[in-house]
Image (cartoon, coloured by chain):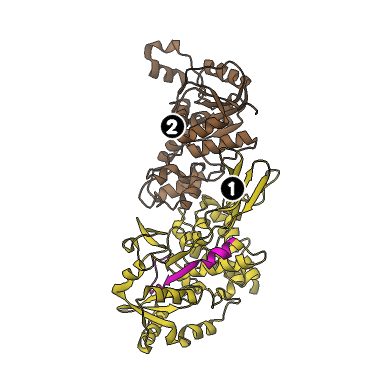
Chain colours: A yellow, B brown
Amino acid sequence: MENVPFVLTKLPSKSIMFYCIFSHMKTEQYKIIEKYLIKEFVNRLFPISKVVAPVYKGFGNYVFEEIKSEENVTFKYIPTILPPKKYLLPKKETILEFKKNQELIIQPVVEYENLILFGVHTCDIAGFKCLNKVMSDTPKDVSFLLRKEHIVIIGIECNDYCDQYASCAFVGAHLPTTGYDLMFTELNDIFIVHVHSSKGTNIVEKTGLFKPATDAHIKELRELREKKAKIFYNEIPTERRYIPDLFDRSWNASVWKELEEKCLSCGNCTAVCPTCYCFDIAEEVDLTLKSGKRFRIWFSCQLDPFAKVAGGIDFRKERSARQRHRFYRKFRYHVDRFGMIFCTGCGRCSRTCMAGINLKEVLISLIKESEAKIWRKWL
Amino acid sequence: MKSKPKVAFFDFACCEGCQLQVANMGELLLEVLEIVDIVEFREIMSEKWDGQFDIAFVEGSITDEHATERVKKIRERSKILVALGSCATIGGVNGMKNSFPLEEVRRYVYGEFHKFFPTVETKAVHQVVKVDYFIHGCPIYQPEFLTVLKCILQGIPYYVPEYPVCVECKLNENVCMYDRGLSCMGPVTKAGCNSWCINNGNICYGCRGLTVNPNTEGFKEVLRKHNIPEDFLIKKIEMYNKCKELDK
């Protein structure tokens, strides 16, 4: 993002956010495109670079994958199996190559390519912002940051809930704020498009299908957002600002014990999370045994070997401790460190959990238990 | 140049399908032959070797006294012994024998001639001799075989992943079998196969054996939610894991 800071350095207060979204819409930053042209728009992306978009996989499942034709793209979808995070932080990323003949040659590797991510929901963009915050922290993750520079993010705004698992309004990820190059919002027979960076402008110019938006369009967009404010509600019966306190009271909550029995430790919840970034390092040599690669691969705090250290000691042996760790990583630790809640409300962890561990239910149960504690204190 | 390590393949009670996976490796097999010297491998060659083996791959489970003696001799002659495939690593399907009285099993299989076929409880190879490396799977997954071979040649251990198949399956973005209305052993089965079956549209049969520290009770709850009888799970687990009882 050349002209726009990719990350907010501080979470804006609600009133500022309201101001940004509703009062500060500059008509000249918006374009429109007729709905029937959207497929043509996707077609015109192909000459620019590799295009990745949501594709239907059957049984209510979607994935982000490379598309070669607009036919495969799904414009309406529920969050994909894996978040588009996999393009910023590949599942298996080469970070080093080595070769030994007479002498040992070691070469660091950064893998990146020009990529257009089309159709990203605001929850996943919120995930990008979280990752960006972490990777920009010292020591900077050069691979991630370089890769990000080569990716164009084209968002699609959700005008309604995807399903019952989402909690995007609770974390404020249901509205586009920042972190994208273009944002498509569906109005009656057009998409109104927020052009948010020079990369976005470039796409608008190269595809040549856009018209300038008029004040009437902006009015319509404003009305849509007002309508959305009625559709989306705070899914968790508390406010975001109370979350750190809630977690400070919940270390010994009974819900963790319940999770001990339920959780299968399959790591699905962390694999599908847009803000998880834990990794393992692995090395592979080829069959000559003289050269090879070092990889960074996704890893998960939910798995048995994750917290095992020398001597066979496992400092997070119980499944309850691992699940608790996951929740504290989303709602407590990162608030101190980065001033952000690391949940985007996409609902993937709840959707994918075979054991039916539901993020919203866990939070609600924490709130209930914690309320009881507070009352006891007063009585 | 140092001579290449001498490698041999042996089989016990098994279908020899894991050796077939090695024989079927295609062009990669030529690269393997660049770094090792295969001296005995009944499935692909007639030659035998009467010396020491640097690496012996043993397929199959140990099911009678004769096999016990034979595998002990192979162990004595081998610097490194590798259990190849689920029959060897966890007893595999042969372990189902242990669910029945041995006498009944013999009669069932050999009828009136059963007295000529003495038998013992099915055992995995490590329950008889020391095993240095384990390559799980029914059959083995070729890439894992190569990984283990490279580890052996580098003199480093190979760690079988201590987490379930779901981990790899999710990264491969397969549609969950439970979403398709099918049952799958992925949640309680050792990973390392890169969810090979599910990638190809099949369910996981749990051939690599139960994962370390599986939450079987939690899994039963999941099955109940999907209206799958508990008995079904027990049978599925016993299909490959029966010999595990002998580990205790």
Say which element carries label 1: strand
Other residues around mark 2 within 10 Å, as few (<14) / some (14–19) / many (≥20): few
Residue A164, image quadrant:
bottom left
Query: In this image, B173 relative to A134: left or right?
Result: left
Q: What residue type is disc 2 on?
A: Asn
Residue B74 seen in this snapshot: yes
Please state which of residues B103 and A323 is positioned toward the viewer in this rendering: A323
Residue plotted at (63% across, 62% down): A251
Say few, some or many: other residues with alpha carbon within 10 Å of mark 1 (under 14 / 14 to 19 / 20 or more): many
Question: Looking at the image, which residue sits at the far front?
Answer: A102
Task: Identify residue for label 2.
Answer: B24
- Residue toward you, B215 or A90: A90
* Chain bearing mark 1: A
Magenta segment includes A111:
no
Q: Position of residue B81 (x, y in %)?
A: 59, 27
- In the image, residue A274 lies at what x, y percent? 51, 63
Q: Residue furthest right?
A: A311
The magenta span reads A143-164
- Per the rendering, the mark at residue A293 is 1
Q: Identify the subunit bearing mark 2.
A: B
Query: Residue visible at 70% across and 45% down?
Result: A310
